[in-house]
Image: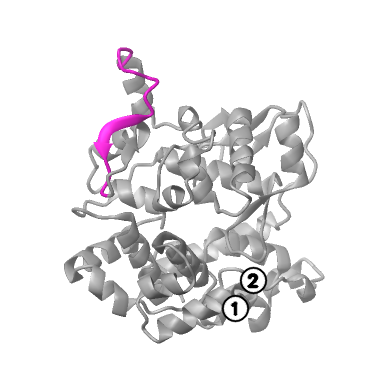
Amino acid sequence: NCNKPTPKYKAEEAVVLALQTVELTGESYDAQHIADILMGYKSQNVGTQDHQTINTFGKAKQFFKLASDEDEDDDDDDDDDDAEFSDDEDADGNPIPKAKAKAKKAPKSKGRKNTEPEPIEQCVSMVRQIAVLGFLEKDVENYGVLKLSERGRSYMKDPFPLTLSKDHDYDNEKIIEDEEKEASGGGSHDVALFELLKNLRKKIAKEKNLPPYVIFQDPSLEEMATTYPTTKDDMANINGVGMGKVVKFGRQFMDLIKKYVDDNEIETASEVVVKSAVNKSKIKIHIIQQVDRKVDLDIIGEQKELGMAELIEEIEHICYSGTKLNLDYYINQVIEPDKQEEIYEYFMDSDTDSIAIAMDKCDIEDITEEELRLMRIKFLSEMAN
C-alpha cells in the first residue's frame, strides 16, 4: 500500500532461527509455539515439552521489538543485557522474559487501538510469512502444525537476503525477497481469491458482531483459496471448518468461490482436498467421547497418559477442526463465573485469539494460561463451531 507503507526488516537471521526451531522441536507444533520459543516465552506448552532448554529459546527477541522498547534500550545502557529474565514471575512462578515483562508493565491505552503489532505478533507473523513463501508446509493431518519443506532445509544450509513485513495484518502484509537470488516455489494459494475471502469474512464478522477469527481463521481461508470448495462436503473437508461451520457460515463463502471459479474458468479437483485426520485419530475420538460423558479432564489425561497442557492442546486441535465441545461441566468447577465472564468478554473484543497476547493484555486478576486456554475453547465452540 503506497499510502501507508508497511515496515520491513532484514529477516534472514530470524528465518534461520525459526526453521531451526521447527526442526529441533520435531516438526510437531504451530506458529504460536515456535514464536513463543523464539521470543523466550515459557508458555505452558513450552514448559511441558521442556522447550525452554533448546538453543534457539529467546534468540529472536532482538529482531522483534516495539518502537518504545527500542527507545528504552537506548536509555538503559547500564542494564545487564545478558540477563534473559526479569525479576518478575508469572502466575505459575516462572521467571518472565525481559521482553514480556516490559510488555506487561507498559501502560495500556484505553479507547484506542495501538496500530503497532506486539513483538510476539511480529514473530508469529514472520513464521506464517515464511510458510506462505514455501519454507514451511502445513501438516495436513494435524491442524496448524508446520513442517520443514525442502526449500526450508535448503535455506538453513545456504541462506540468502530476505526482507519481510513487520505488520501482522495480512491485509497490509507484503513480502519482498531481495533480487540477489530468485526464489522458486512459494505459497500455492490463489492470492486474489484469498483477499476476496478475507473481505467477506470481515463483512460477516461485522454483521454478526464477532471477531473475524471466529468465522474462519487464515489457514482455513488459504486452503479454500487452494482447493476451491464449492459444495458442503468439500467445504467441510477444509482444515478448521467441519460441517457445523459450513452450516453456520459456509454458504456465502461457497457462493463467492463458485462465482470466482466460473468467472476465471478455473478447473477444480475436489479429490485433492485432504481431510484432517482429527476424526480418525483414536485419541481424539476418545477425548470427544469422554467430554460428551462429562468425564473430568484430569481423568481423561490420566487415561491417555497426557499432562493437562498436552490434553488441552489436543482439545484445541479438535475445536479448531470444527468440532463443538462443551467443557462447561469442568470449567465451572475450576473458574469462577465472574472470571469466566471477563475472559469471554476479552476474546469477544480481541482481534486475535493469541494466548501470549491475552496474558499481556487482559487486566483480569490472577489469570493463568490454563484458564485462558480453557475459556478460548469454550468461546470458539460456542461462537464458531
Which residue has dot 2 on it? Answer: 276
Query: Can the viewer see residue 172 in this picture?
Result: no
Query: Could you tell me residue 237's position as x and y percent?
Result: 65, 75
Which residue has dot 1 on it? Answer: 279
> Majority secondary structure of the magenta segment?
loop
Q: Quadrant of the N terminus?
A: top right
Asked which secondary structure carries label 1, the reply is: helix
140 displayed left or right of 88: right
Q: Residue furthest top?
A: 78
385 displayed left or right of 86: right
Q: Is residue 308 magenta?
A: no
Instruction: Give the class, few, some or many, for how many residues have Cα within 10 Å of label 1's Cα (few <14, many ≥20).
Output: some
Query: Can the viewer see residue 96 in this picture?
Result: yes
Three-letter code, disc 2: Ser
Q: Write the start and end of the magenta stretch as one range.
A: 76-91
Three-letter code, disc 1: Asn
Query: Could you tell me residue 126's position as x and y percent?
Result: 56, 41
Query: Could you tell me residue 210's position as x and y percent?
Result: 38, 67
Tell me what residue is drawn at x 36 percent, y 83 percent: 294
Asked which secondary structure carries label 2, the reply is: loop
Do the numbered discs 1 and 2 sit on residues whose CB atoms are within 8 Å? Answer: yes
Query: Could you tell me residue 76's position as x and y percent?
Result: 30, 17
Tell me what residue is drawn at x 60 percent, y 41 percent: 174
